Amino acid sequence: MAIGVYFDIKQDDQLIATGSHFWCEGCLVARPLDNQSLDPRYCQGCYEFLLKEVKVLKESGSTRHPGWIPKPQRTQENQCPIPSPGASIMAGINDKPNHTCQKQTEDGRGRPVLDLPFALIKELQDQDHGATEIRRQLKDKGIEVSMRTLYRVLSGQTMMGVNDEATE
């Protein structure tokens, strides 16, 4: 005789869609919004448990900083969108990562936003120039850019066309 189903993703999705619940990354179920902790990823019970785990981690002398460590809630304008349940687990090979949270904030954290000549980079890419040649030509114009950043621009992970007028 089954009393009730605890894990029902369809029911959880419906509750989250109504706005009355949130997804707890500790319990892996939908929880009522009034049970949400300071860290929007966890319910109050999971938050308190994980804070105790952080104390144990510090006492053991570990210098690791795992991603599950509870963080105080950020302001709404700097907050990254919370993915749907299982989104990181179910990401495909060709899925593009979400880099909207990686712009530098006012307090100096995050990846700095560079004023790159995206039009010139696109033009050189269309002329079948490789990343090394593009970087060399940018350096000749006095623009320092790392290969990693250049690869991000060329692969489309960084928005091209935003700062086209920055160098002209």
Image (cartoon, rainbow, N blue to C red):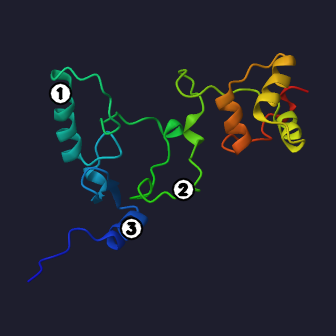
* Amino acid bearing label 2: Ile
| Quadrant assignment for the N terminus | bottom left
Check disc 2 and report its element: helix, strand or loop: loop
Placement of 154 over or under 111, stated as above or below: below
State the separation of the CA atoms marked 2 and 3. 24 Å
**Marks 1 and 2, how far apart in space?**
36 Å
**Mark 3: which secondary structure?**
helix
Q: Which mark is residue 13?
A: 3
Q: Position of residue 82 (x, y in %)?
A: 45, 49
Classify residue 29 as left or right of residue 1. right
Residue on which the image places disc 2? 93
Identify the residue at the far bottom of this view. Answer: 1
Return the disc, 2 or 3, that comes first in the chain's sequence: 3
Total marks shown come to: 3
Amino acid at pointer 1: Lys
> Mark 3: few, some, or many residues within 10 Å (few <14, many ≥20)?
some
Q: Is residue 32 above or below residue 53?
A: below
Tell me the number on the disc at residue 55: 1
Q: Nearer the viewer, residue 123 or 130?
A: 130
